[in-house]
Amino acid sequence: MASGAVKRLSTSAVDWARFATVIPKAQIDTMRIIKGKHDNFLNKVYTLPENLPKIDFAAYKTRLPDPTMADRFQKAYESLSIPYPKDKDNLLQKVEDDYKELDKRVQNFVAEVNNDIAESKKFIDKINTLPKFEEMTEEMYSYYFPETQMDPERPTFWPHVEEEQPYNPNYKYIN
């Protein structure tokens, strides 16, 4: 009996080392508590005998006033079979499907992050090709950053913010 349970339990074993690397550091203590409970349960299952203990029904027949009662108990005891719970709602398959979907989402997220990292590295490489700030002239600055170049057709006035410029429709001149 116990060996069947052990076989079923061993197929659903948890990879605790991988689990410890995946969970957030703040939940390590919770994982240790769960692992302790899991280990206690497994130890309890491993200590159980493989089969039901043997009962000497012949000795009971000699002691009981009605020996047929011992026969009924023996028949009931030998026909005792405790089935392993069945997954009627197919929950295990649903969990596996959810895991596969989540795994696909994680892979997509990792791919997006890797793309962002690649773009950031390209940007950093471009930044590294620029001359040092101390060595840069106004002409070089205008060449490398044309979007910040002053437009002679639209001069700006102090405080040089877009909202405070006369050509801005929201500009409010205060006398």
Image: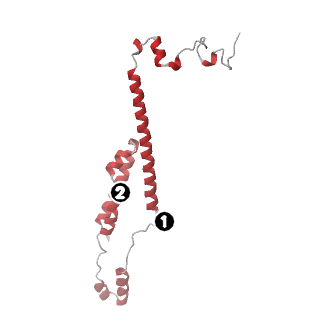
In the image, what residue occupies the spot 58% across and 14% down?
Answer: 160
Q: Secondary structure at mark 2?
A: helix
The residue type indicated by label 2 comes to His
Seen in the picture, residue 37 relative to 22 is either above or below; the reply is below
Q: Secondary structure at mark 1?
A: loop
Mark 2 surroundings: few (<14), some (14-19) or many (≥20) residues within 10 A: some
Q: Confirm or deny contact between disc 2 and disc 1 (CB under 8 A).
A: no
Q: Position of residue 55 (x, y in %)?
A: 29, 79
Structural distance between the alpha carbons of marks 2 and 1: 24 Å
Give the side of residue 106 with respect to residue 58, left or right.
right
Q: Position of residue 144 (x, y in %)?
A: 46, 19
In the image, what residue occupies the spot 48% across and 19% down?
Answer: 145
If you read the primary sequence from the N terminus, does the residue marked by circle 2 or circle 1 appear first? 2
In terms of image quadrants, where is residue 133?
Answer: top left
In the image, what residue occupies the spot 28% across and 85% down?
Answer: 59
Seen in the picture, residue 111 relative to 163 is either above or below; the reply is below
Give the side of residue 136 with respect to residue 59, left or right.
right
Mark number displayed over residue 145: none
Using the image as rendered, state which of residue 59 and residue 36 is in the foreground: 36
Q: Position of residue 76 (x, y in %)?
A: 38, 82
Seen in the picture, residue 12 relative to 121 is either above or below; the reply is below
Give the residue number, with chain letter if any, for mark 2.
Answer: 38
- For the N terminus, the image quarter is bottom left
Seen in the picture, residue 161 relative to 36 is either above or below; the reply is above
In terms of image quadrants, where is residue 95?
Answer: bottom left
Give the residue number, with chain letter if any, for mark 1.
Answer: 89
Give the side of residue 142 with respect to residue 172, left or right.
left
Mark 1 surroundings: few (<14), some (14-19) or many (≥20) residues within 10 A: few
The residue type indicated by label 1 comes to Asp
Using the image as rendered, state which of residue 108 and residue 140 is in the foreground: 140
Give the side of residue 76 with respect to residue 172, left or right.
left
